[in-house]
Image (cartoon, rainbow, N blue to C red):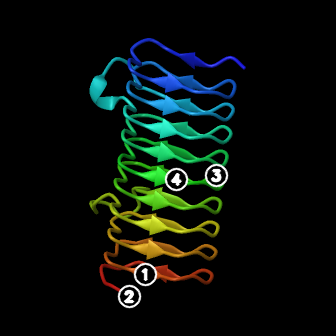
Amino acid sequence: NHNQILSGSDQSFIGAGGDNKIMDYAFQSSILGGFGNIIKGKGQNVNNASRESAIVGGVINIISNGSYRTIIGGGHHNSASNAAFDSAILGGSYNTIANLASSNIIGAGSYNYIGDLGTQGGLSFPWFNFIGAGSYNEIRDGANYSFIGAGLSNRISASNFSFIGGGARNRIEHLCSS
C-alpha cells in the first residue's frame, strides 16, 4: 500500500489505493485510488510534464510524457502518452491515446487507439475524436472531428468529420466525409 509523490510534483494528491505514483514534475495531478497507477512527468522540463492530470481508479493505468490535462477514469492498462493532451479514457482495458492527439475521448472497450502512427506523412495529428466502445478500433493520422461508436477493428484515417456507427472492419481512409 505504498503510494508515492516524487519531487517537483507540487500540489499533487493520491487519495487511496496501493503502489500508485506521481512521478517527477507531474504537478497539480491526482490519483484518487486503484493499484499501480502512474502519472509520469518528463524530467525537469515543465513544458513536457504530465501536469494537471488525473487517474480516478483502476489498475496499472498510465499518463506520461507531456500528456497534460488528461484523465483516465478507471479500467486497467489504459494509457495516455507522448503529449496526448486535453483527452479522456473513461474505462475499459488496453486503450491508448497517444502521439500529439488532443481533445479526444475513448469511452470503454479494449485495445482502442487514437493517435498518430506516422504512416500518413505530413498530415495533422488527430484532434476532437470519439471512440465509444468495442475492440481494436482506431482513429489516427490526420483524422479530426470523427466518431466510431463501437464494433471491431474499425479505422478512420486521413479523414475529417467521419462516422462509423459500428460493425466490423469498416474503413474510412481518405480526406472526405462518410
Q: Residue 94 carries which label?
A: 3
Q: Residue 178 carries which label?
A: 2
Which of the 4 image quarters holds residue 91?
A: bottom right
As measured in the structure, the alpha-carbon distance from the residue carrying label 3 to the one carrying label 1 is: 23 Å
Which residue has dot 4 on it? Answer: 89
Amino acid at pointer 2: Ser
Pick whichever, 7 or 15, lies toward us.
15
As measured in the structure, the alpha-carbon distance from the residue carrying label 1 to the one carrying label 2 is: 6 Å
Dot 3: element:
loop
Q: Are marks 1 and 2 in contact (CB under 8 Å)?
A: yes
Which residue has dot 1 on it? Answer: 163
Mark 2 Cα-neighbour bin, 10 Å: few <14, some 14–19, many ≥20: few
Dot 1: element:
strand
**Residue 64 at what x, y percent from top left?**
47, 35
Residue at the bottom extreme, as displayed: 178
Relative to 30, does residue 124 appear above or below in the rendering? below
